[in-house]
Each structure stands twice: as C-alpha cells, then as structure tokens.
Image (cartoon, rainbow, N blue to C red):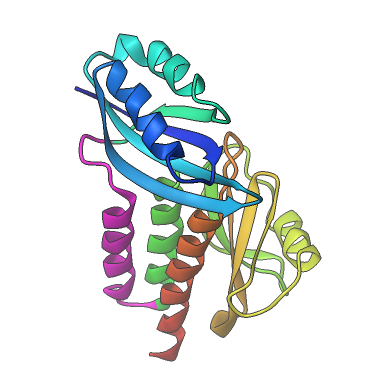
Amino acid sequence: MALFVVRVWLPDRPGALGAVASRIGAVRADVVGIDILERGGGRAVDELTIDLDDARHVDLLIQEIAQVDGVDVEHVRPARSAYSDRAVESLELSARIVDSSSVQEALDVLVLGVRDLFDSDWAAVIDPAEGRTVAVAGGAEMPSAEWLAAFVIGTGHGEGAYAAVDELARTTLPRQAAELVVSRQHLPLRDAERRIMSTLANMADRHAER
C-alpha cells in the first residue's frame, strides 16, 4: 500500500469526480479520502487521498486522471502517514490548544500544529504594532518580524479576517492584537485550509479571556 495526496482542479458539475474515480480505479487504486478545498467560477479544487498498490505507478495514476476532460493535476505528494486525515488531525490539534495551560503555550502549540497540518514552510504569531515575534515554528527562509508586521499592516485588519498573497496567508487574533502568518511556497493555501487556520487561531486567541 502507498498513500498519495493528489490535488486536482475539476469542473464543478455532476459526474466529474466520478469520472476521476473511474480513472483511478483503472490503475488498481482506491480513493480513501476527499477534501474539498475551494469552489467557484465553475471549477472545484479537491484533494484526493489515494491508496495505490505500487508507488512506482504514481506517474501512470496522474496520466489517467489527466485524461478526464477539464481536469488538471496541480500537485502530488505522499501522505504524511498511513492514517493521514486532516479532519481528525485538526480536531486533535484543537484539543491540544484548548488543553494548553497558558496563552503562550497555546500559541506555541498553534504555530507548530498549523505548520505540520498544512505541510507549511513556517508559521508565526507576530505583534504587528511592536514588530516582534510572539511564537514561531520556523524555517531557514522565514523573513524578519519587521517584514511580517509590514505584510500584516498591508493586508488589512478585522476580527476573523484572513488574507493571502502568493504563498503567504494570515489570520487575526483580535483579543491579543496579534496575527498568525503561514507560508507554504510549493502550494497555495486554499479557502478551506485558511478557514481551518482561522478557526484554530481563534481557539488559541480565546486563552486571553481566561
């Protein structure tokens, strides 16, 4: 068994996903998970978790999917584990945030969890007014806190708001006057992913009320 996550663009019409599933079955593979990331303009962006008999057949799998009219394969990656399920992982991360003993611990759990949940390059909570990092799960390509503060100021404000520019996405923690900023250079964060990110940030933000 080899699990892969395949991100596809497909026509938002009845039967399109069934046609893709039929092509997947033709190479002796099964769809074991579906995550709808975005819909609009007559198209949908879905992530399919696919159980493939032989990892050497992944190129053939992608070729079969691409044969469906109007379907484009955006990205393919191995699943993080044999039981990879973003919905379950999001709930587990939510529980860890809620169980945190302090605001700082909640923020530390948030940035590390979001970075891993979305296979991101880095995640950080910053105080834009002071231009400083509050919590970080970083990487070598992470910009300075001053640059991130300028990005936040430039993309606007508002409780529950988020904005994305290329590989960057951000969401507000209004009770703490802070912002969660996430980078994933290899693959844009889509609407459903940013909504999850915003919900998790809100959970961490509520620790300020305790």
- Does 68 sit above or below residue 122? above
- Does 200 sit above or below residue 151? below
Closer to us: 100 or 50 = 50
Residue 100 in the image: state x and y as whole percent.
30, 73
Q: Is residue 121 visible?
A: yes
- Does 27 sit above or below residue 12? above
Residue 119 in the image: state x and y as whole percent.
45, 41
Closer to us: 90 or 127 = 90
At x 76% / y 64%, what residue is drawn?
Answer: 155
41 left or right, relative to 109: right
Q: Count of labels shown?
A: 0
Q: Residue reaching furthest front? A: 14
Question: Is residue 37 highlighted in magenta?
Answer: no
Closer to us: 9 or 55 = 9
- Does 63 sit above or below residue 172? above
At x 27% / y 68%, what residue is drawn?
Answer: 95
Residue 164 in the image: state x and y as whole percent.
67, 55
134 left or right, relative to 127: left
60 left or right, relative to 132: left
Pick the quarter of the image with the N terminus.
Answer: top left
At x 28% / y 47%, what residue is drawn?
Answer: 85
Q: Is residue 136 visible?
A: no
At x 33% / y 11%, what residue is drawn?
Answer: 57
Residue numbers of the magenta segment: 81-102
Residue 45 in the image: state x and y as whole percent.
52, 44
Pick the quarter of the image with the C terminus.
Answer: bottom left
